[in-house]
């Protein structure tokens, strides 16, 4: 039977760092509140578009897999903050890479978009539609942020990462997936100002207003992720002790700890980087996966558990088996241009632009 092994991985983090202290210069908040409630200490603000972040991440993933862009047969891009609705984000990446043989599609399930994109690509590789795929997860959510709302603007950041999956005969890659959507909680997280619904209204596109019921999302997230994680383990007849590393969606340290308690896996076997980047939505799981590899936390043959949730409220868990190779086959020279402004300067400029647009 055909499986879809992960053969390449790469990330791209924009360099400009926005600290909790930076946020406290224009919001009624504090480092103490943000750190104790979320675990987040800083996040990145991108000076380039999502296409440029994805281009660098993809080049690094392709180099790690020893693949040329021309080899790639499918690009699936998981994101919520695409630069254009038509043509899609994936074809923009295809064009940048010159991956002329690829088919390209976007998947939008908010923060779970990378994992849903991986499921989509995995199914196509395993069923023989394509032999390989580039799967991307990333966001430049800062462009859609309502910086006047302290309930949300302290939580999110920008970033992108990609993996390459390829058909193999050994059992590697995804072992089990559980996907779902807690639609009773759909209204708990809504970003007004990000869709066609707003085209005819006075509100300018991108002039967002976030509906965000933090505690409601928190409860449903822990439930959904916990159930999905238990489900994938049961499907494979595995116990919590069989999981080598949990790489969860990184929205809030307290959510990660609650899910770990639910699935009965100690925090030493949970990868956490939310303190450095905040919630990068579709970017969180792939970036955490790349960093877990870079830090030597993924061993050859490791069993990985990846639970996530996002607006919708979509939830899922993916169980994967890593192959023998944990080092990249090659590296890429691809890099972002330096950021001409600090993160705080960029955010202040966005605030000023919104104020001008609001008249
Ligand atoms: O990927 C999907 C993304 N969604 C999420 O990850 C959301 C999940 N939910 C959460 O992570 C948490 O619910 C939050 C971090 C959003 C909030 O934490 P909480 O412990 O549930 O706080 P709370 O909403 O109950 O707010 C407590 C207090 C409130 O003040 P009062 O009403 O007690 O006077 C808030 O107004 O904290 C206040 N508050 C803040 N204070 C300082 C809310 N945001 C801030 C802030 N700085 N940034």
Image: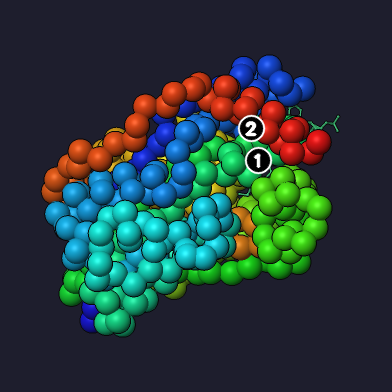
According to the image, label 2 marks what residue? 350
Q: Is residue 46 visible?
A: yes
Task: Say whether residue 14 is left or right of residue 179.
Answer: left
Residue 203, label in figure: none
For the question of whether residue 323 can be seen, the reply is no
**Residue at image x 25%, y 46%?**
60
Q: Which residue is mark 1?
A: 145
Is disc 1 surrounded by few (<14), some (14 to 19) or many (20+) residues within 10 Å?
A: many
Q: Picture coordinates of residue 240 (x, y %)?
A: 44, 56
Q: What residue is rendered at 17% in x and 42% in y?
A: 331
Q: Residue at x 22, y 59 (%)?
A: 69
> Considering the numbered disc 2 on the image, is that residue within a helix, a strand or a loop?
helix
Is the residue indicated by label 2 positioned so its CB lies within 8 Å of ligand 1?
no
In the image, the residue with mark 1 has its CB under 8 Å from the nearest atom of ligand 1: no
Q: Quadrant of residue 95?
A: bottom left
Quadrant position of ligand 1: top right
Quadrant of the rendering where the C terminus is positioned:
top right
């Amino acid at each position: 039977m055909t499986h879809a092994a992960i053969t390449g991985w790469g990330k791209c983090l924009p360099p400009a760092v926005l600290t909790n202290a930076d946020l406290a210069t224009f919001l009624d908040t504090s480092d103490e509140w943000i750190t104790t409630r979320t675990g987040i200490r800083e996040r990145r603000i991108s000076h380039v578009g999502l296409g440029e972040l994805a281009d660098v991440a993809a080049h690094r993933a392709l180099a790690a897999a020893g693949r040329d862009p021309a080899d790639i047969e499918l690009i699936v891009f998981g994101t919520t903050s695409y630069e254009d609705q038509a043509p899609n984000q994936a074809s923009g990446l295809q064009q940048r890479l010159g991956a002329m043989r690829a088919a390209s599609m976007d998947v939008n399930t908010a923060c779970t978009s990378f994992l849903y994109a991986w499921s989509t690509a995995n199914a196509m590789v395993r069923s023989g539609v394509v032999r390989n795929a580039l799967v991307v997860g990333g966001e430049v959510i800062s462009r859609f942020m309502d910086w006047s709302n302290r309930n949300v603007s302290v939580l999110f950041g920008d970033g992108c990462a990609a993996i390459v999956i390829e058909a193999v005969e050994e059992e590697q890659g995804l072992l089990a997936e559980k996907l779902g959507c807690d639609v009773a909680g759909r209204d708990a997280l809504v970003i007004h100002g990000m869709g066609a619904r707003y085209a005819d209204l006075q509100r300018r596109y991108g002039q967002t207003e976030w509906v965000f019921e933090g505690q409601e999302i928190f409860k449903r997230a822990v439930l959904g992720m916990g159930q999905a994680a238990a489900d994938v383990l049961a499907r494979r007849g595995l116990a919590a002790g069989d999981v080598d590393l949990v790489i969860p969606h990184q929205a809030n340290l307290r959510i990660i700890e609650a899910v770990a308690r639910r699935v009965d896996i100690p925090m030493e076997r949970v990868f956490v980087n939310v303190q450095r980047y905040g919630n990068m939505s579709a970017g969180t799981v792939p970036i955490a996966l790349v960093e877990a590899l870079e830090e030597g936390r993924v061993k050859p043959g490791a069993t990985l558990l990846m639970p996530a949730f996002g607006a919708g409220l979509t939830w899922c868990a993916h169980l994967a088996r890593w192959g023998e190779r944990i080092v990249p086959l090659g590296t890429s020279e691809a890099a972002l241009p330096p950021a001409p402004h600090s993160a705080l300067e960029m955010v202040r400029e966005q605030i000023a632009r919104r104020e001008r647009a609001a008249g």
